[in-house]
Structure formats: structure tokens, C-alpha cells
Amino acid sequence: AMSTIAFTVCFAVWTIFAIIGIQIRKELNLTETQFGLLVGTPILTGSLIRVVLGIWTDRYGGRVVFTATMLAAAVATFFLTYATTYPQMLVAALGVGIAGGSFAVGVAYVSRWYPPEKQGTALGIFGAGNVGSAVTKFLAPLVLVAFGWQTVAQVWAAALVVMAIIYWFTTKDDPVLVERRRTGEKPKSTWLELEPLKNVQVWRFSLYYFFVFGAFVALALWLPQYLIKVYGVDIRAAGMIAAFFSVPASLFRAYGGHLSDVYGARRVMYWTFLVSVAATFVLSYPPTDYVVQGVNGPIAFHAEMGLIGFTVTVFILGFFMALGKAAVFKHIPVYYPQSVGSVGGLVGMIGGLGGFILPIVFGMLLDLTGLWTSCFMLLFLVALGSLTWMHFAIRQMEKETEGEKLAELPAFPEMQGMGKAGRKPIQESAAVLTDWRPEDLIFWEDKGRKIARRNLWLSIPALLLSFAIWQVWSVVVAKLPLVGFTFTTDQLFWLAALPGLSGATLRIFYSFMVPVFGGRLWTTLTTWSLIIPALGIGYAVQNPDTPYAILLLLALLCGFGGGNFASSMSNISFFFPKAEKGNALALNAGLGNLGVSVVQFVVPLVITAGVFGGLGGDPAMVASPTGEAPLWLQNAGFIFVPFIILAALGNWFGMNDIASAKASFAEQAVIFQRKHNWIMCWLYTGTFGSFIGYSAGFPLLTKTLFPDVNVLQFAFLGPLVGALSRSGTGWLADKFGGARVTFWAFVLMMIGVSGVLWFIGIKDQPNAFWGFFASFLLLFFATGVGNASTFQMIPAIMRKEMGRLMPQATAEERRLQAEKESAAITGFTSAIAAFGAFFIPKGYGTSIAMTGGPEAALWAFLAFYVTCLVITWAVYTRKGGLLYDIERGRTGPVAATA
């Protein structure tokens, strides 16, 4: 604890030039390259001195060396205030850098207090002292603005002295040093301390740290001025925003150590480099103006990452860098228990040199190219090279190893052949449930229900956000003309309809992904994917000159949200026993469907307020009954970004995979041979296809038919009624049978459509809108009831069919096959039904374009419901139908629910 606090103070001093350097550059009129050298000089000292300090720690103990390091750095930082010329600043900066060498001292000292299986976590917690960089970014700008940069240096120097005194009186010599003194053993010579460094693999290992730590330090120093120059924020705001990178890149290092202890450093490093490559690629894209030669002339548009997108992306980058830093240092005390100081010092030195070299190169690249994003271009190449190098090294290692020897390989290929001292076997992932028996009552009551419910309640908010992103265009399109977009009615209906088309298409693929990849990983990835359309909409709607093609592309990308439903329902279906499956699926789908209502309720509110202040961009001034009023239409996308991040993190850290639910696509593809799969696709299109299609098209249809009505005040009520009726009526299907409830749901839907047609015919009469609106509410209610009941039917149908299809199989084999096929059919039927989100709004648009009104489309919908009603009766509910005996043979609540 004391070492972590001390390292935090040292790191705050080590990165002090990230803030005071900006003021010094103004006073001395420095070039970008000179500024980069000044900022990087302390990093150079702190890096080069690490090997020496690490060796001294091994020889003399961390307590005395750490205290001396802090006092020496305090003296240099205090005398910095007397420097007046650039050379004097550089000399003083060399002394300030001593604070950075404290890392090698702490690694060697802390590791001696813990056994090998806990050293990863311990060193991860110690390394979280990197948060000192964020401390400087938060506090130094306030002191600088109030009292000047000299006061910042003096206060930081005083903090080092106070910390050194506290540290000396609250810590003890480490056990190794105490034992050495007791036995009179002499410490190893310096040459023996350096012996492991001759191994070339250690140097290669150090280069990984060059990126995860060196690039972190470089960005911690570079980001404040980057934000000031690129986004025009003041120094206080720049410090605060830069902390969004520094804080996760520091605090989550402790969690990275835990992950490395439990799952292995290789897995952690793969995730680190994969995400870093993606993040740096996005950040490296410079502001660009495009001119596309279209049929009707040139089409120009501008592409640039805004401040919010930048902040979110660097947060993600910092988080995974933190995991990578801990993963790298997991191995040093395990493989070099007698040389932690020297090896840790070398690795830390290489990483620290990255913090010195990279800011200088950033400045040179900026001077040479004139592109601020050139720094991220360089980091992209470094991350990509590291990932490629590591992957091919691992593949080569695995090719040369077979059988049991493969399991004994170290978590890094560089460590092959270096011995196994203290190595702890990597545990199987706790996120994978290898024993899952929901039908076993004892197992279910003991721990199954708790796990299943946790996964359900983490799935629901992710699905709610997916529906919100999927349907956000249903609200945005109605406001586009107000902010300057000049599109025809048919073009607006296309924008409202395309998310339904892409979402439905993606559902076809998503419905098979959970058994292939695992529900936890797939849910996390698909939730993260929602950020792309959310940010894209926020940027695009701010400029009325954004081409229609770009808006069409964003509408298609919103289909990511629609696709998520198929995989979410498939995933949850595996967790619950048949007696609780219907209610669980109803809750997941019904509360997830609330995302449609949420988007139609929340977006009209947030677009009228500057929720994000200056970070959210300027509002558009639009006409209102009281005169011109500001409208932040970009908030329709931006408002969901923080919630998407939280939901994705919750999915990854809280959800589970079920080992027995694994299946290839080929194993699931058998459902295409099941006739009931196609029948249920037709029926579920009638229920869910209607729900999502009416949700997407209702606001624009109402605006077209009743232009004097403020439709956004009421639009959310329809999806709300449909979602609540779905989540609240699952018990009806459990009690009376899904097919019977579905039959009567279609009867209600026919009545609802007939009412809509009637009130459209008299739309010019008083109160016609309220009859029109009430008819739609009945439609939404009936679709919600039908959504729950049709999904109740699917597992019941497949359990009945397995007796015929697998007569020789055991009861358990038939149960497992029915579970897998039910999950696949559930996902696939939801995919087909989701095309309703495209065809219903498009049907309105086509009907209006061809006939002048939507009546033709509504008559077609009514005829479709008649076919659904007939099929439900003929195949399932009539005497002799597949579910007749099951549903009418029950005397109480049904045990076999969906």
C-alpha cells in the first residue's frame, strides 16, 4: 500500500512537464521538436536509471533506495523553479526524471513480499500508481492558472519530501534482505545481477512494454497540448479530458494483474494488442474532405473525429494498455525470482525509453507532416508490429510442440526454455460453466438460478440499448428537415426502413453465433458495436451538407442493434429450465423491447438541451411556436454512448458461457429441415414483425397523416405498451398454451388494423387522431402478447417433435437436442420477423407514393394476419393439431414452458 502511494506521487512528479511544459513553451517560444525534447527528458532519466536502481534494490533493499530516490527527485524538482533558459530547463528535467526510476525499485521490493501465484495481482496494484499522471492533469492546471508553473513545481517537490518521510517510518526491510543479514550472506555481484540480460528473448519481451507503457507515458505527456491545438479547449479542460486516458491506463493495471494470474498473460496480451490496433487506427485518421463525382455532380462531405469520440476511444485504449502492462510484468518475478531488480529494471527502462523517444518523434512527425494525427499513425504501426510478432512467435512455438508438452508452454513464447520456477497452472476461465444442469432441481436451487438471473439482468440492458440504436432513426428522420436537410418523404421513409432491413439480415447470422463463440464474448462484442452508429449519427446530423449516402450507411449500421436480439434470445434460452424459460425469454425480450419506447421518449427530450455542454457541438436554431429555439439533434446518438460502454463492460465481466451449449453452424443448420421452423417464422413475423415495423413507421406515418399533432409526445407509448404486454403476459402462454394465446392475439390485431383503417378514412373529423392512436395502441398490445406466446410455442413444439425425430435417443439426448434446436429456431425466426421493420415503413412509403395514402399497405397487413390466424388454428390449436393435447391436457401452470 505504501509503495503504491509513493509510486503515485513519484509518477505525478515524473509527468509534471505535461502541464507546466505548455506554459514554459509559451515563455521560451519553443518549437514542437524542442517541446517534445523538454517533455521527454525526465522520461529519459527515469528510464535509464531503472536498471541501476533495480540492482541497488536487490543489493541494499527497497526501503532505503525508494526513500533516497524520492528525496533526490524532490531536490531536482525544487531547483527547476530557478531555471530561466532552455538549457537550464533540460538540465533540471534530467534531475526530475529520477522520480521515474522508482518503478524498478517498487517492482523488486513489492514482489519479495508475495508468493508467485499472487505476484501478478500485487504488482498490478503497485503499477496502478501510474494514476499519478492523472493526478497531475487534474490538479496542476488549477495551481498553474492560480499561482504559476513555479508554484506547481514547488508543491510537487514538497509532496515528495513528505511522502519520503512517511514511507521511511511506515515500511520495513523486505524478508529477503532480512534473511540475508541474518545469515551473513553477501549479495550477488553486479555482473551476476546482469547475467539474465544476455538472453535475447528478454530484450524482445521488453519491446512489448515499449508499447504498453512507453506509448502510455508518451500520450500522457502529449495529449494535453494535442487537445488544446486540435479541439481548442483550455488547459484545464485539456487536463481533465486527458485524464480519461491516464486514469483507466493506471487503475485497471491492478485488474490486469489479476487477469494474468487467473487466465494467463498471453490471452491478456492478445486482447491488448487487438484493441490497441483498432483504437489507434481510428485515432490516426486525419480530418478529411471528400469529393465524390456523382451522377448529378460532385458530392462533398467532411470526415473528422469529434471530441466525444476521441475521449471515448482514448479511454478504451488506456484501459487495454493497463491490462497489457500488468501482463508483461506478471512473468518477471516468476521466471527471474533472484533477478527481479535487474530484469524488471531493463524491461522498465525499455518501456520508459518509449516515453522519451515517442514524444520527440511525435513532434518531429508533426513538424514534417503537419498532421496532428501522425502520432497515432506511428502507434498503430508499433501495435500492429507487436501483435504480428507475438502471434507468429506463438504459432511457431505451438507447431514445434505436441501433446502434453503444449499445455506446459509458458504464457509468452519468449519465455520458452527459461525454467518453470514458481509457475502456477493457469486456471480454467471462471466465466465458462462446465457443469450446467438447470433441470436438476437441487443444482438449480443451489446455484443455477442465481447465475441464470445474473446473466438475464445483464442481458436486458444490453438488449434495451440495442433496440434503442436500432430504432433511433424513427425519431431522427422526423427532425432532419428542421435542421436543414432537404429530403423527400420517400427518402425519409427509406432512412426509417433501412435499419430494419440490415438488422433483420444480421439476425440470420447472429442467431447461430452464440453456440459458436459463446454468449459472453458475443454479447460483449455486439454491444460494443453499437458505438459505431451512435457516434456516427452524432457527427453526421450536425452538418446539413452530409450526403444522403452517408445517412443511408449509418441507417444500415443501426442494424447492429437489430441483429443483437437473435443472439440475445438464443443465449438466454440456454440458462433456464423449461419451467422458467417462458418467463425469462419474455422478460429479456419485453424489457429489451422497451428500448424502442425509451428512444422515442428520451431523444425528444435530450435534443432540446445541451446535455454535453461544449463537448456535444453547437445546436441548430429551428423554428418553434415561441420563436427560434436551439436543437441538439446530435444528442440522439451521443446520449447512448456512455451507457453502451457500461453495458459492454458489464457483459464481459459479469456474464457466463455454457460449455454444453457449444455447437458449430453445421450442427445448428438442421433447423432448415424442420417445417415448424418456417411456420414459426411466418407467425412470428405477424407478431414481432408488426411490433417493430409499427414502431419504426408510426411517428412518420402520424406526422404525414396528422401534421398538426406533435407526434413525438405520444410515439413512445405504443412501443411501451407492446414491450410491457410482452414481458407481463408470458404467464398467459404458460397457463393456457402459447398457440391458443397466439390465435387470439391475431384476432386482436385484425381488430386493431380495422380500427386504423376506419379512422384514417375520417381523419379530417374532430378527434379522429385519438381513435387512430387508440387503434394503434391495441395493435401494439396484441403484438406484445403474441410475441411472448409464439416464443413459448417453439420449445414446446421441438420437445414434442424430438420424440418422433429421435426415437432411439435417451431422454437427456432428446432434451439437449431440443434445447439447441429451439435456441437456433428462436434466433432464426426473430431474424426473419425483423424484416417487418423494413417492409412496414417501406410499405407505407410505397403506398403513399402510388396511391396517395397508406390504406393499401394496411389492407395488405390485414390479409396477412388472416393467414396467420388460419395457420395457427390448422397446425397447432385445432383438435388433432400438434399442441392440442399438450395445451388442453394441463390442469395448472404449465411445467414445459418456453
Image (cartoon, grey):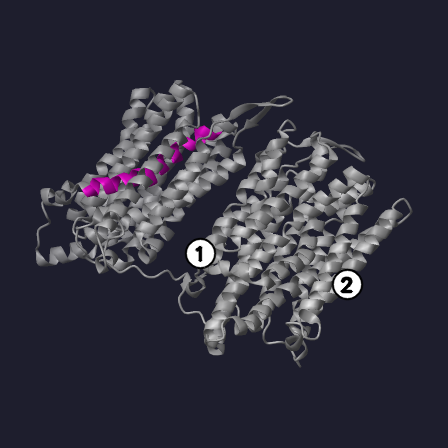
24 over 845 or under it: above or below? above
Q: What residue occupies the far right of the structure in this picture?
A: 765
The residue to which callout 2 is attached is: 747
Q: Is residue 597 left or right of residue 528?
A: right
Left or right placement of residue 301 versus residue 694 in this view: left
- Which residue is found at the position 67% from the left and 51% from the top? 692
Residue 437 relative to residue 425: left or right: right
The kind of residue on which mark 2 rests is: Val
220 in magenta: yes
Query: Could you say which quadrant of the image residue 199 lies in?
Result: top left
The disc label shown at residue 896, or none: none
Q: Answer with the quarter of the image where residue 95 lies.
A: top left
Query: Along the line of sight, which residue is nearer the eye, 421 or 628?
Result: 421
Left or right, 45 with respect to 579, comes to: left
**Position of 245 relative to 227 (above/below):** below
Q: How busy is the neighbourhood of tag 2: few (under 14 within 10 Å), some, or many (20 plus)?
A: some
Magenta-span inclusion, residue 198: no
The residues tagged by marks 2 and 1 sit, at their Cα atoms, a distance apart of: 39 Å
Q: What secondary structure prevails in the magenta region? A: helix
Query: Which sits earlier in the primary sequence, circle 2 or circle 1?
Result: 1
Secondary structure under the numbered disc 1 in the rendered image: helix
Q: Which residues are magenta?
A: 201-227
Location of residue 503 in the rendering, given as x and y in whole percent from the top left corner: 59, 47
Which residue is labeled 1 in the image?
516
Secondary element under disc 2, as helix, strand or loop, is helix
Residue 485 location, x and y as percent? 69, 30
| Structural crowding at the residue carrying mark 1, measured as other residues with C-alpha within 10 Å and reported as few (<14), some (14–19) or many (≥20) | some
